[in-house]
Amino acid sequence: MKLHKLIASGLGTGYAPVAPGTAGSILGILIFYCFNFAFNKLGFQSQFVFVLNLVAILGLLFLGVYSIRKVHQIWIHDAPQIVVDEVVGVWIAIFAIPFEWQYYVAALVLFRFFDILKPFYIRRLDKLKSDWSVMLDDVLAGVYANIVLQAIVFYEII
């Protein structure tokens, strides 16, 4: 159970006394940035990095839902400590975006915007009260943030 608590709490960031979701999102963006920094420094081709990022997102998504299911046995539904969904959501927000720090900051801000306000069916997913709904509302917030960020990159706004 300790491993599932560690995963579900985003390596403990979910225990932050203030804004645990933001703490988990910051952890997520830092991990993704560091991985992509390392991949770029090691000279990996962009297509390979794309695949590695996709595998990481899908892997943590399924592992996260499994850990959420396990911790729901002892924690309330969507307990504040559960932030693995924020990590996955922010990874989706920055997925397939050029490796520049400004985009990572924008992804974090946009993801938190959609995650907190919960527009366009995100709130509906959040109210479903299942292990998957805990994850999927943040997945959708990440998708919306990614769409906005893709437009920002395309129109060279940043």
Image (cartoon, rainbow, N blue to C red):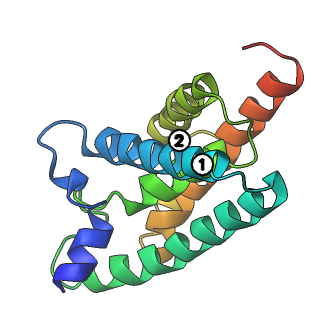
Give the farthest residue toward the front: 42
Q: Say which element carries label 2.
A: loop
Number of other residues with Cα within 10 Å of mark 1, as a class: few under 14, some 14 to 19, many 20 or more: some
Q: In the drawing, what numbered circle is on residue 36?
A: 1
| Of the pair 120 and 85, the residue shown nearer to us | 85
Q: Quadrant location of residue 148?
A: top right
Q: Say which element carries label 1.
A: helix
**Residue 11, position as x, y percentages in the image:** 26, 61
The amino acid sitting under disc 1 is Asn
Q: In the drawing, what numbered circle is on residue 133?
A: none
Q: Quadrant location of residue 81?
A: bottom left
Give the farthest residue toward the right: 154
Q: Is residue 35 visible?
A: yes
In this rendering, the count of numbered labels is 2
Residue at point 47%, 43% (across, down): 29
**Residue 90, position as x, y percentages in the image:** 53, 47
**What residue is shown with label 2?**
118
The amino acid sitting under disc 2 is Lys
Residue at point 49%, 65% (across, down): 135
Q: CA distance from mark 2 to mark 1?
A: 28 Å
**Residue 8, position as x, y percentages in the image:** 31, 69
Left or right of 39 in this view: 86 = left
| Of the pair 116 and 61, the residue shown nearer to us | 61
Residue at point 41%, 44% (across, down): 25
**Residue 21, position as x, y percentages in the image:** 33, 45
Left or right of 125 in this view: 27 = left
Give the farthest residue toward the top: 157
Query: 63 above or below 44?
Result: below
Closer to the observer: label 2 or label 1? 1
